[in-house]
Structures are given as structure tokens and as C-alpha cells.
Amino acid sequence: MYKIPTSETPEETPERYTFYCYHETYPVTAEDESDDCEYSVNDGDCLGQRATYNADNIPADLTRKYFCRQQFNAWLRPSTQKKYNSCHGMYALANLCLWGEQDVDFDDLNEDECVEDACEDVYVCYDSDDNESDAFSFFRKNRMRCTFSESTNTAFAEWRDPVKHV
């Protein structure tokens, strides 16, 4: 039996896509001796001697790029995700989620599509080979009593890659 071809495309179902916005940040030394030793090893012992973080005076092998990685979950149709498949697109989705602002370069999302802030921000760092790791694990390993005071501008965005992202 012959079927008449139609120009209609099957309805797409939204799928979950995770992406991250990376905000530049810089570590600062934890100075207060009376703190609760928040960067302790699992057995509860304090890290002991503190290393002072001074960006101008640290060994080259400890020099890293630090970011606050903000996670977003987007439920998008595959065709919509392709339209937002760039740094600019991910920034547009993040702004839509956080501020309710629709970027003029993109169409409105369909009724069954949405973006949410996953509220799972993580501090990460990159070594000279661009390998991502948890910043606080790096501090513990190198016996550095550091924390982060604030994040600055957004540096880049990426779709989640389970091999690359911690």
C-alpha cells in the first residue's frame, strides 16, 4: 500500500540537557585560626600547617585557573537545543532562567520547555593540561587553607560531558 508523504514532522518530546556557566573566581587564604576547620580531611583532623595563597608567590605547579561552576538543567526539544548549542545560547538560557529575560537572538521556548538553576554550584580548577578537578580537593591535597570570597564575570559555558566534568 502506498502512503502519501506528508510534510508534517513528528512532535518532539523535551529531553533533559545539563549545562554549566563558569564564573571566574580567585582563592583567598583562610586567616581565622578559630574557624571550624571547614576544609578538614574525612577523619575530622585539621589540615595542620597552613599555606598562604599569594597568586604572585606560589609554585608554578600549583598555579591554576579557578571557577565557580553553576549548573543549569534545560528541558528542551532536540531541535531547540541545537539552536542554543553555543556559548551565547547557553548564556541566553541562563538569563532566561535567572532573570526572565528572553534574548532577542532566540525564539521563545515552547510551553513544554523550561530551564532551571540546579542550585548545585561547585568550585573547580584547571591544571596546565586543562583537566578539571574539585578546587577544595586540590586545596586539601596541597595543604592549602583557602576559600573563595566571590565570583566575577562569566568566562564561558559548556554542555555537560560526563567524561570531562567532575
Image: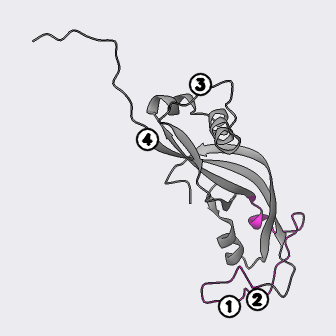
Quadrant holding the N terminus = top left
Pointer 2 or 4: first along the chain: 4
Which mark is in front, 1 or 2? 1
Tags 1 and 2 touching, CB below 8 Å: yes
Q: Residue at x 64, y 43 (%)?
A: 97
Q: Magenta segment: does it hold 80? A: no
Q: Of marks 3 and 4, which one's residue comes earlier in the chain?
A: 4
Identify whether 42 is placed above or below 77: below
Q: Which numbered marker is on residue 107?
A: 3
Where are the magenta residues, as a range?
A: 36-65
Q: Which residue is mark 2?
A: 48
Determine which of the numbered discs, if any, sits on residue 15 in the image.
4
Secondary element at tag 4: strand
Q: Position of residue 129 (x, y in %)?
A: 65, 55
> Relative to 36, is 159 above or below?
above
| Tag 1: amino acid | Asp
Closer-to-camera residue (86/120)? 120
Q: Residue at x 60, y 44 (%)?
A: 158
Which amino acid type is shown beneath numbered disc 2?
Gly
Residue 66 x/y as whole percent: 74, 58
Q: Residues within 10 Å of mark 4 (few under 14, many from 20)?
A: few
* Badge number at residue 45: 1
Looking at the image, is mark 3 or mark 1 earlier in the sequence?
Answer: 1
Instruction: Kindly check if marks 3 and 1 are in contact, taking CB atoms under 8 A apart as contact.
Output: no
Q: Main secondary structure of the magenta part?
A: loop
